[in-house]
């Protein structure tokens, strides 16, 4: 691929996000999106949810009603899309051009299995109670790179994977704005110094009267020691940051086939409202070649493909039957942690 992605790496450095136009992803990826969209709709139908028919949507599982998030990456067409070598090339090029990561860490990108995200039209959202994810950061800003230990204090515990960037490919056109049904972000949160401002505050979590600023928070009405131990000036400082973030959100536009990339430290949220048609996005988890991630891949392979109904990453156990390992190479399966002894490629 001859295209240079330094311009887009610079945009991430300057404003913490970028939109890669579909033309740079190539016709092969764009032409595959229709099949991905069809497979998603059909898989929902098999499980009793017709996302094109508002009258049937409320029959879906609870997580679907709330956020429109479902782990569908065991659909072969979606796995192939997320593993397309062009996507690896683009993400690796951007990571290298950002000059923040070692060559070893970017040499091989592992595949953290993500989800698809579907935003219903406004009237259907109201019918089924789909609220979308509130403002959050998919990291712990007070421990960005430390080793993951589930026994650590929840407020200072590191995230279990090293994932500097988050991204999705849109399966639909999104006009942007608060009524467009798309992703909300706070541009330049990192580059303008607001991340450092947050890190200078005591580790904290969700206020019951507001959104979650990070996902590292005690459950409501349980462990509230973190708030009781803060002074009034500290709480006011936290509230000011929360209010500033709430007012700073924008909703960029993007087209079917465009790829949206942002820093993991960037506050983001689900759709504010959707006055357009059905919005569909395929999230793609490209993570660095680090020891933490190599260990996570082993666990992901054990959890994701164990056919366990107790797996919290599962919404419906029968959905994973669509994953056929014989359709993929050993290299592709290894990137998502599929157990080699059971993949039929030995």
Image (cartoon, rainbow, N blue to C red):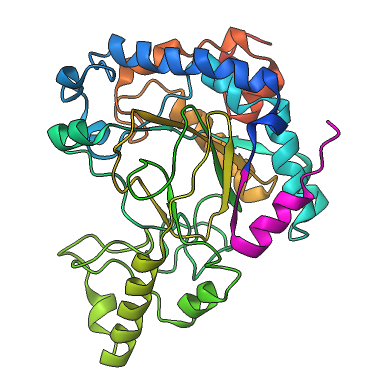
When the figure is inspected, residue 15 is found, relative to residue 133, above or below; the finding is below
* Residue 211 left/right relative to 167: left
Residue 292, horizontal then vertical, whole percent? 61, 50
When the figure is inspected, residue 194 is found, relative to residue 2, above or below; the finding is below
* Residue displayed at 32% across by 15% down: 318
The magenta span reads 1-19
Q: Is residue 142 visible?
A: yes
* Residue displayed at 36% across by 15% down: 41
* Residue displayed at 66% across by 10% down: 345
Tell me which corner region of the image, top left, top right, bottom left or bottom right, holds residue 44.
Answer: top left
Residue 193, horizontal then vertical, whole percent? 56, 76
When the figure is inspected, residue 253 is found, relative to residue 191, above or below; the finding is above
Which quadrant would the C terminus be assigned to in this image?
A: top right
Which is more toward the observer, 165 or 247? 247
Tell me which corner region of the image, top left, top right, bottom left or bottom right, holds residue 226.
Answer: bottom left
* Residue displayed at 69% across by 39% down: 109
Which is more toward the observer, 163 or 303? 163
Residue 2, horizontal then vertical, whole percent? 86, 34
Q: How many marks?
A: 0
Residue 200, horizontal then vertical, whole percent? 48, 82
Instruction: Please check the rendered image and state whether residue 3 is part of the magenta-colored stretch, yes or no.
Output: yes
Which quadrant would the N terminus be assigned to in this image?
A: top right
| Residue that lies at the very extreme toward the right in this rendered image | 2
Q: Is residue 340 visible?
A: no
Tell me which corner region of the image, top left, top right, bottom left or bottom right, holds residue 11.
Answer: bottom right
Instruction: Please check the rendered image and state whether residue 294 is part of the magenta-colored stretch, yes or no.
Output: no
């Amino acid at each position: 691929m001859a295209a240079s992605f330094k311009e887009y790496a610079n945009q991430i450095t300057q404003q913490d996000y970028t939109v890669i136009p579909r033309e740079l992803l190539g016709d092969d990826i764009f032409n595959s999106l229709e099949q991905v969209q069809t497979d998603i709709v059909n898989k929902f139908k098999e499980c009793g949810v017709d996302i094109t028919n508002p009258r049937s949507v409320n029959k879906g599982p609870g997580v679907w009603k709330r956020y429109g998030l479902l782990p569908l990456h065991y659909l072969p067409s979606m796995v192939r899309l997320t593993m397309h070598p062009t996507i690896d090339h683009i993400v690796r090029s951007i990571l290298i051009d950002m000059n923040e990561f070692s060559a070893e860490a970017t040499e091989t990108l592992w595949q953290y299995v993500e989800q698809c995200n579907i935003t219903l039209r406004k009237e259907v959202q109201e019918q089924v109670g789909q609220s979308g994810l509130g403002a959050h950061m998919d990291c712990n800003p007070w421990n960005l790179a430390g080793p993951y230990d589930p026994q650590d204090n929840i407020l200072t515990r590191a995230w279990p994977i090293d994932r500097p960037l988050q991204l999705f490919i849109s399966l639909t056109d999104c006009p942007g704005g608060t009524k467009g049904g798309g992703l909300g972000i706070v541009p330049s949160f990192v580059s303008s110094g607001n991340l450092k401002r947050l890190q200078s505050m005591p580790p904290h979590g969700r206020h019951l009267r507001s959104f979650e600023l990070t996902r590292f928070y005690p459950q409501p009405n349980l462990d509230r020691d973190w708030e009781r131990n803060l002074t009034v000036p500290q709480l006011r400082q936290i509230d000011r940051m929360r209010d500033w973030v709430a007012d700073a959100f924008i909703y960029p536009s993007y087209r079917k086939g465009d790829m949206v990339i942002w820093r993991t430290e960037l506050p983001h949220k689900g759709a504010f409202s959707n006055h357009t048609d059905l919005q569909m996005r395929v999230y793609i988890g490209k993570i660095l070649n680090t020891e933490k991630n190599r260990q996570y891949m082993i666990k992901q392979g054990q959890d994701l493909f164990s056919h366990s109904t107790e797996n919290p990453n599962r919404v419906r156990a029968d959905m994973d039957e669509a994953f056929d390992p014989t359709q993929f190479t050993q290299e592709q399966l290894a990137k998502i942690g599929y157990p080699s002894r059971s993949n039929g490629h030995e």
